[in-house]
Amino acid sequence: MHWEFVIAGYAIVFVLLIAYAAAIVQRGRRLSEQVPENKRRYLD
Amino acid sequence: MNRTTGSRLTRRLGALAVVTMAIALAFGLVFSPPEVAQRDAVRLMYLHLPTIAVAYLGFFITMVGSIVYLRNGSVFWDLVAGAAAEIGVVFSVFLIVSGALWGKPTWGVYWQWDPRLTSTTVMFLMYLGYLALRRLDLPPDVRSRRAAILGIVSFGNVIIVRYSVQWWRGLHQGQTLGVDTQLDGLMLFSLFLSLVAFLLVAAWLLIHRFRVAWLEHQLTRIGFERALAERRGDLGGGRVGEEAR
Amino acid sequence: MLRDAWLMARKDLRIELASKVTIGQILPFGALVLILFGLAVSPDLTVLGTDRRSVLAQASPGLFWMAVLFAALLTLGRSFAIESADGKLDALRMAGLDPAGIFLGKMLAVTAQLAALEIVLGFGAFVLYNAPLARPLQLIVVVIAATTAITSAGTLYAALGSGLRVRDTLVPLLVLPVLAPVLLAAALSTEAAVFGESSGGWPWTLLLGVFALLYVGVGMLAFGPIMEES
């Protein structure tokens, strides 16, 4: 019972979650290209 | 080297997070039983409650980072504060969506002004303001300082809003989602598993988001240094050009 | 510090008396909001279980405080807009003054302006919404507590947004979630004072007082760092 709400909830959350994660990683890649190698990481 | 924000740590953490989430989903959606009154709608609890924990934790980290930044000007903590707030806001969206979708089959309405959902929505809007402040085109230290003050005060506000809304709705028959849910051992275990899974995911996100923020910070600094060098070059450059001719 | 606060407050109020922006522009705006509420909420609907009390009258405490909140946003914005062309607290002029005193002074000036607005808007609400007035003294206490709660937090947040080009859009976004509990407490306390039905109201008024004290403290502490614009 009520499966449509469960599916909708999980689907929306996970789609958004994965999209957000992908956006961060992609932005990270793009920015890394613009920054000199030795300055890319905080701990380097 | 380091062409992405990934590292051995994040790859392992990510793998662990995915595996834990998969198991948590299995328990939440399949192995755990439907609840007595809510039936299968209760499965949204395994989504709703962990996202609340992550959101609050994120904003708490923002507050801590803001305090440390104000004390010693540490860029690291300023960036952590900003990254944590963004993750908190994202998880607030999840919280509101899962809460509304849990409410409809349970209460018959998507929104019934229950204390937790109402106060967390206000919290969400509060931190949207915080993120807006962080995006402003200001001298970085001015911006960071104002954001830090906001980051500290906002968490205090979260507590005030939480308790006043709870008090308000407590006067009526305001029932928070989950309070009167009957949980048996397997359900508790599924809930705990989901919580761990979401915390791992959030940690992974935080590390990556921090590294992105660090890269942005470096780019800004490089931009400043370049502008400064050009200015210096202008002052002494005329002479050099003449000599070269 | 108190001397600086007094200087600041006097300066701000003198500017207001000369420019008359609060009474000439913000007050009419507030009145308009009250009237628009009447248009938005039909005066003919009545509440069940009361002696034919209109919905508008029943909602009047909340509507009054909403109108006050909107007016407060404008008043707070104005408080920092008068400082300089871009609204930034002029560092040179402020150099001698204690930041906590500046905060207190600005807050007091805005409180005075808001209080004047509330007297007129309150009168307007009683007339427009046909609201009763069961406990006038309680109402006065509530209004004082709520107004200081609004201005203490409001002055802090208006300062956070001062000097920014986006201040007119950012400050409302920052300040309204903070003032949500204040609105709640003020509306409930006012309801108790106006209708005299529930014995409650005082706990909420206490909340307002605590909130105000808290934000006066926070504001005084945070103003120094905010003003450090290098």
Image: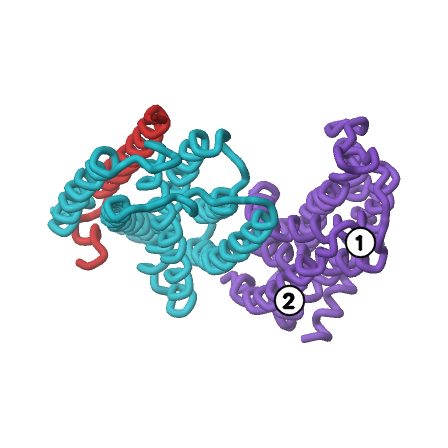
Which subunit holds the residue at mark 2?
C
Name the residue beneath numbered marker 2. Answer: C213
Q: Residues within 10 Å of mark 1 (few under 14, many from 20)?
A: some
Q: Quadrant of residue C62?
A: top right
Q: Quadrant of residue C57?
A: top right
The tint chain B carries is cyan
Q: Can I make out residue B245 in this image?
A: no
Q: Residue at position x 24%, y 38% from top?
A: B32
Mark on residue C16? Answer: 1
Chain represented in red: A
What element does badge 2 sit on? helix
Residue A34 image position (x, y, % from top left): 24, 42
- Quadrant containing the C terminus of chain B is top left
Identify residue type, mark 1: Glu
Q: Nearer the viewer, residue C82 or B171?
A: B171
Which subunit holds the residue at mark 1?
C
Chain represented in purple: C
Identify residue type, mark 2: Leu
Q: Can I make out residue B25 in this image?
A: yes
Residue B164 image position (x, y, % from top left): 57, 54
